[in-house]
Image: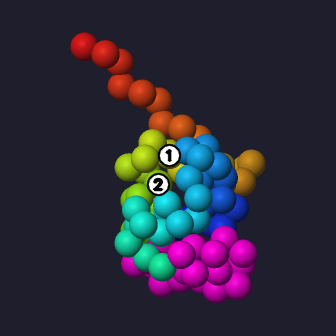
Amino acid sequence: MITPAQCRAARALIDWSQQQLADAAKVGVVTIRQFEGGASAPRNATLTVIRAALESAGVEFIPENGGGPGVRLAKAWPAR
């Protein structure tokens, strides 16, 4: 799914606060804070909306491939 470290890194890439992510994902900021801090593991549905919010802002999630999971900015579509 998505790890707390990926969530923190994704927010940093797009310069979002925890509150901005919470607003975009339509979840409470406490949910984001607790997840990123490792205090709780949200339900899969919550992780899905968090990930979708980050992806819609331009983040691409990189799966575990021997080097660990990560994030990067999605490549922009070429202008036509």
The answer to whether residue 1 is left or right of residue 38 is left
Q: Which mark is residue 78?
A: none
User: On the image, numbered disc 1 is attached to which residue?
Assistant: 59
Q: Does residue 65 lie above or below 50 as drawn?
A: above
Q: Main secondary structure of the magenta part?
A: helix
Whether residue 66 is visible to the viewer of this picture, yes or no, is yes
How many residues crowd around disc 2 within 10 Å: few (fewer than 14), some, or many (20 or more)? Answer: many
> What residue is at 31 percent from the left and 16 percent from the top?
79
Task: Answer with mark 1 or mark 2, whichever residue precedes in sequence.
Answer: 2
Marks 1 and 2 sit apart, C-alpha to C-alpha, by: 6 Å
Residue at the limit of the structure toward the left, as seen here: 80
Outermost residue on the top side: it is 80
Q: Which residue is mark 2?
A: 54
Residue 24 location in percent, x, y?
A: 40, 62
Mark 1 touching mark 2, by CB under 8 A?
yes
Crowding at dot 1, Cα within 10 Å, few <14 / some 14-19 / many 20+, comes out as many
Report x, y in % for residue 5: 69, 62
Disc 2 element: helix
Magenta span of residues: 29-47
